[in-house]
Amino acid sequence: MTSHASKYTDFETLREQALALRREGLSRRRIRDRLHVDNNDLLNRLLQGEPPPDWTKRPNAKDDLRARARELRLEGRTYDQIQVELGCSKSSISLWVRDLPKPERKRTREEASAIGRRGWEARLRIREEERQRTKEAAAREVGPLSDRELFLIGVALYWSEGTKDKEYARRERVVFVNSDPDMIRTFLSWLDLIGVDRARHTYHLMIHETADVTGAEHFWADLTGGGPERFGKTTLKRHAPRTARKNVADAYRGCLVVRVRGSADLYRRIEGAWYGIVGAASAALR
């Protein structure tokens, strides 16, 4: 007899009492209280080999799903079809039906691929529609811009994409470079807002030599409204023959460089306004 059972005069008698109570449907806690057994190890020994009553078994919520998955598999359904009907994961389905024979293939690989392709294309269309709805809703939320809002946007835009003065290379001049027509339009609108005469603008195109150079020159001339006298000589970018250029779509029109003549004072105003934005944002954060 172990040290745990030594305090009891007759272990076998105690075990018989514990088993009888268990068969009556009592829980472990009630048996422990009834027999005054205060040690779980001893209680385990007393009930060893006796299954718990049915009422203590917790039902498995997936039993019905498992049974239905097996029925569908025997009907010849695929994992995808079972998943659509039951809404459970493929890993669970695989675990439940792996012992069942695979259904016979009813379609050729080409037909199955075509079906999968159509399903994927439909999903992509849905995603694109959702993407466009989100963008359109966000655009509507902006509404009209005040002069102050456009001014602050223009300052941030320039500080992101324009050239900056360096302590080791003083270049206090306004030069803005971008390939996005909307960015260029916004920057030109900003210059108009702060009263920069369009006569002070000059433009310069940088583009890959393999692109439609003439078409790009006409595009930027129409966008800016600047005549040939406003445009400098186009810079052609050359690349190694083995380099694969990725910007080859029809929308590629190179980068436009917008310069403002006599813009040292304007540059200083931009830099000062930018640090004013930084200071205000920092104060709001604090």
Image (tube, helix red, strand yellow):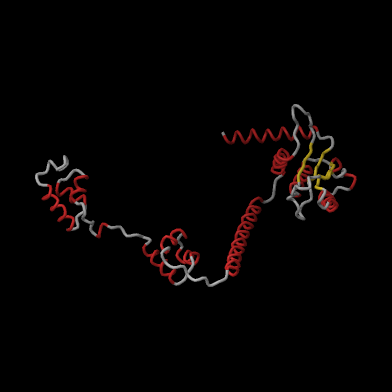
Most distant residue in the left direction? 9
Quadrant position of the N terminus in the picture: top left
Q: Which residue is located at x 14 percent, y 51 percent?
A: 15
What x and y, as percent, mark residue 31? 18, 51
Q: Is residue 208 above or below residue 129?
A: above
Q: Which residue is located at x 26 percent, y 57 percent?
A: 56
Most distant residue in the top direction? 168
Judging depth in this view, the residue of 197 and 29 nearest the camera is 29
Q: Is residue 142 above or below residue 278?
A: below
Horizontal relation, residue 224 to residue 140: left or right: right
What x and y, as percent, mark residue 160? 70, 39
Judging depth in this view, the residue of 109 and 51 nearest the camera is 109
Judging depth in this view, the residue of 131 and 266 nearest the camera is 131
What x and y, as percent, mark residue 234? 85, 45
**Residue 168: quadrant of the picture:** top right
Q: Is residue 209 above or below residue 278?
A: below
Q: Which residue is located at x 47 percent, y 70 percent?
A: 103
What x and y, as percent, mark residue 136? 65, 56
